[in-house]
Image: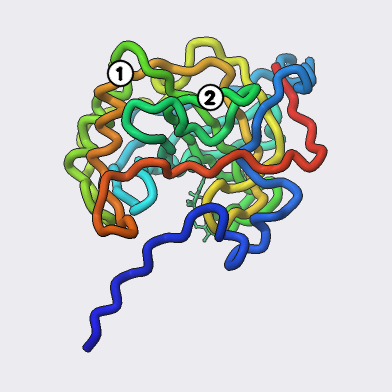
């Protein structure tokens, strides 16, 4: 029988054909115009509380669109800040650009891009599981952390060293060591927050975004390690890169700031 190769995923500018919400009212990412962000004292009065445990990470998988560190929910909770309830970490992944380039982040700050952006995905505990939460307006909270190119990030190294072990889609390796994802957060916990969506299909408008203001430095080698992950390109298997969605219309949304 004719072997039908799995279709190469279509780029962001085609997603609206299958996911009309791509042209919705609260899509992500966005360009954060810092002069339009409104400082909200309530955010600092009730500080964002991040309490992760250091044995929550189970495995790293190549999803065919990014790496994904799967986390079991034990003791990995965030609350406070813009959140009205407790959310639990379910996975973290990233988006990045071409080798050596400065584009790659999904959110931009006054038009400035970073070489990569980490997403820590959490689901609202008022729902019974992430599947129920994933398409609800208050279902998810994602913490975005910008990666800048600089010195090696010791905390990211145990993870970036695993990418070479999961080159192909669905490859998976267990994480046998204790790992606390909080080490990936910048020291200064200031952030911007706004209501948005998943940045990949199905693009559900279910995300309270918390984008940390300060980037964390990772080395050029750690950024290059992201390209040990492979994916399908129109000309066959290639290095995974440019897996980021560009900024979407703000549609009048307010971005708040600590
Ligand atoms: C069946 O519907 C589903 C809905 C969502 C998902 N997920 C995978 C998505 O790729 C995705 C993208 C996220 S991002 N870039 O942080 O905005 S978060 C997230 S997910 O883990 O929720 C899976 C199935
Ligand atoms: Zn993401």
| Residue 233 found in image quarter | bottom left
The N terminus lies in which quarter of the figure? bottom left
Q: Residue furthest bottom?
A: 1
Q: Residue at x 36, y 41 (%)?
A: 241
Q: Position of residue 27 (x, y in %)?
A: 67, 46
Q: Position of residue 251 (x, y in %)?
A: 78, 42
Q: Nearer the viewer, mark 2 or mark 1?
A: 1
Residue 174 placement, left or right of 244? left
Q: Residue furthest right?
A: 252
The one of 191 and 36 positioned closer to us in this rendering: 36
Q: Is the CB–ligand 2 distance for label 1 below 8 Å?
A: no
Q: Residue at x 70, y 16 (%)?
A: 258
Estimate the spatial distance between the alpha carbons at disc 2 and disc 1, rounded to whole Å. Answer: 25 Å
Which one is earlier in the sequence, the residue at label 2 or at label 1?
Answer: 2
Q: Is the CB–ligand 1 distance for label 2 below 8 Å?
A: no
* Residue position for label 2: 50
Residue 227 placement, left or right of 23? left
The one of 156 and 245 positioned closer to us in this rendering: 245
* Residue position for label 1: 219
The total of numbered circles placed on residues is 2
Mark 1 lies on a secondary structure that is loop
Q: Position of residue 154 (x, y in %)?
A: 28, 16
The one of 31 and 162 positioned closer to us in this rendering: 31
Mark 2 lies on a secondary structure that is strand
Q: Residue at x 79, y 32 (%)?
A: 254
């Amino acid at each position: 029988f004719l072997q039908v190769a799995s279709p190469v995923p279509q780029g962001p500018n085609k997603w609206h054909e299958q996911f009309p919400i791509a042209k919705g009212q609260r899509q992500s990412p966005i360009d954060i115009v810092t002069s339009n962000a409104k400082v909200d004292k309530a955010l600092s009065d009730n500080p964002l509380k991040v309490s992760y445990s250091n044995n929550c990470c189970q495995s790293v998988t190549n999803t065919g669109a990014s790496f994904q560190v799967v986390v079991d929910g034990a003791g990995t909770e965030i609350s406070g800040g813009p959140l009205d309830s407790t959310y639990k970490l379910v996975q973290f992944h990233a988006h990045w650009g071409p080798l050596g380039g400065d584009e790659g982040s999904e959110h931009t700050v006054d038009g400035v891009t970073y070489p990569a952006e980490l997403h820590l995905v959490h689901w609202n505990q008022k729902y019974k599981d992430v599947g129920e939460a994933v398409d609800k307006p208050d279902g998810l909270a994602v913490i975005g952390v910008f990666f800048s190119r600089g010195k090696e990030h010791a905390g990211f190294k145990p993870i970036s060293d695993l990418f070479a072990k999961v080159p192909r889609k669905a490859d998976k390796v267990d994480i046998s060591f204790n790992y606390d994802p909080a080490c990936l957060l910048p020291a200064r916990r200031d952030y911007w927050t706004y209501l948005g969506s998943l940045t990949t299909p199905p693009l559900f408008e279910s995300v309270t975004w918390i984008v940390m203001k300060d980037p964390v430095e990772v080395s050029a080698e750690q950024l290059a390690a992201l390209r040990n992950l492979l994916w399908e390109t129109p000309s066959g298997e290639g290095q995974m890169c440019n897996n980021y969605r560009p900024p979407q219309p703000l549609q009048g949304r307010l971005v708040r700031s600590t």
